[in-house]
Amino acid sequence: MSLATQQQDEMWRRVAIVAPYLWLLVFFLAPFAIIFKISLADPIIAQPPFTPTFDETGSLKASVDSFTFILTDKFYAITYMRSVLMAAAATIMCLALGFPMAYGIARSNPSTRSLLLLLIVLPFWISFLLRVYAWMGLMNNYGVINNFLMWLGAIDEPIQMMYTDFAVLIGLAYSYLPFMILPLYASLERMDLDLVDAAQDLGASRSRAFWDITWPLAKPGIIAGCLLVLIPAMGEYVIPYLLGGPESLLIGRVLFDEFFVNRDWPLASAVAIILLLLLVVPIVLLQRHQARDQEEAV
Amino acid sequence: MTHHSRFIISVLSFGYAFLYIPLLLVVIYSFNDSAIATVWGGFSTRWYGELLQNDLILDAAFLSLRIAVTSATAATILGTMAGLVLARFGRFKGRTLFSGMIFSPMIMPEVITGLSLLLFFVTLQQLTGWPGQRGFSTIAIAHTTFAMAYVAVIVQSRLMAMDESLEEAAMDLGGRPLRVVFDITLPLIAPAMIAGWLLSFTLSLDDLVIASFVSGPGSTTLPMYIFSKVKLGVSPDINALASMIIAAVSVGVAIAWLVSRRIARTSSNT
């Protein structure tokens, strides 16, 4: 091989690394630095509506007012709490429904299995927004569920479902269920069924065999699935907006409103930074988990 | 057929009903003649007709399609490079940061990604004058950034599942690394690249939150238009629009499934 072609190859290798690397540095990492910078500014009525980091004399101006405001105002503490609790409740609902479903899919014969999996993935391709919207027609006071129950005679007056926490929970569970099922399915499908049979042959009860064998072997899928539901659900905006009421505020919507309605950019940035801090632990857990999973696959 | 307990069968039925009944009802109600979306007023296709005459929807849909094609293509190029780097280049300086940055956009809550990119564009405009107006280009950049992560992961896992012997053989026979990439590796990962492109395309068409942050006046994408309408409640023309999307996706996925099954069958016969 001539030196010239070798140099050319080396150049291409470098392009393959540098192009995506630069893109991510500029459009992913740099924006985070800027969020941090603006969270330390003060809001002013101007364009853009925050004070510059350096004043005319060139000295650094930073204020932690936005952070102290969030940390001392009970409203934010309650909203962060509610977001964590709602996301956790939705995760548990997804796990409770998703685990037996993933188990059933993994244990069906190959031709039905691919169809069942396809039906889990299909909603991914249909607009998220429209899937949430579908529940508005269902849970309305004069929507399908209430009309049906009244027709049955089970209730005389419509039950208030829309604009409640219940509606938000249903919406979260509905939208994120596939994120739970897919990793669960992946780990259950890899599992050796003979182990369960062997345990039962040796006298273990069904539930004993489940808790001692199936559950621990499915653990990687359970962890991945739970984190994949929990993390995005914490910052959800569309679902609480469309299905939740004015009282069922979640932090994603608060951030959106601070920015667009109150036009307080530093405060919105500070809300985002604190949300990010809350998410650091689950995100690092998930990344570690994924890295380990990949090494095992090799 | 493996034996299923009654419990598993009922959970499966309940789960699939939970996933599909809401969609089915939207389709049924899209043929509802009544303007009050929750009252049945007889069968009609008039909402479909009104949909096709609504210029706002058509403009928004066209903008969304343009953004989706652009960002999916850019994301596939950048994501394939990133996947190749992660799967085949071994250790290099800054690899940990690289893989962290690839992975993070996928799980970052959308409000954070959207806010950070908007503040970035505003700062950039103060410093350089670009982007003078937010819209097509800023949304396309935002979508490329999170979609390339998905492409990278798909391409990387395909490369990890594939053994390197073909590429090594080509190199042993004197093939230059770059030629080997284009003649051997890329054709082998083409299915992963197509899957990545399609996923990026869908993610871009689907995105509301990030686009709301980084778009400017006058550029309304389809999800932004839909959101502005459904904020006010259930509306019959959105039912029609949703039904058209559901129909298009179902037909597309059904065709893809049948084709892949046929390929699987012919290859297992030979």
Image (cartoon, coloured by chain):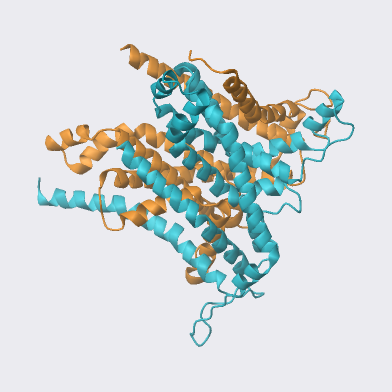
Chain colours: A cyan, B orange
Seen at 47% across and 24% down, the residue is A106
Query: Position of B25 compared to A88: left or right?
Result: right
Q: Outermost residue, right direction? A: A156
Q: Is residue A101 above or below residue B144?
A: above
Give how far across and how far down residue A163 sits, in percent.
76, 46
- Can the viewer see residue B253? no
Residue closest to the eye, A202 or B182: A202
Query: Position of B219 compared to A202: left or right?
Result: right
What is the quadrant of residue B176 in the picture? top left
What is the quadrant of residue B112 in the picture? bottom right
What is the quadrant of residue A79 in the picture? bottom right
Residue closest to the eye, B98 or A76: A76
Query: Position of A183 compared to B78: left or right?
Result: right
Total numbered labels placed on residues in the image? 0
Give how far across and how far down residue B242 sits, in percent.
66, 34
Residue closest to the eye, A212 or A214: A212
- Can the viewer see residue B78? yes
Residue closest to the eye, A161 or B83: A161
Q: Is residue B222 above or below residue B4?
A: below
The quarter in which the N terminus of chain A is drawn is: top left
Seen at 12% across and 36% down, the residue is B172
Give how far across and how far down residue B227 sits, in percent.
68, 46
Query: Position of B108 compared to A146: left or right?
Result: left
The quarter in which the C terminus of chain A is drawn is: top left
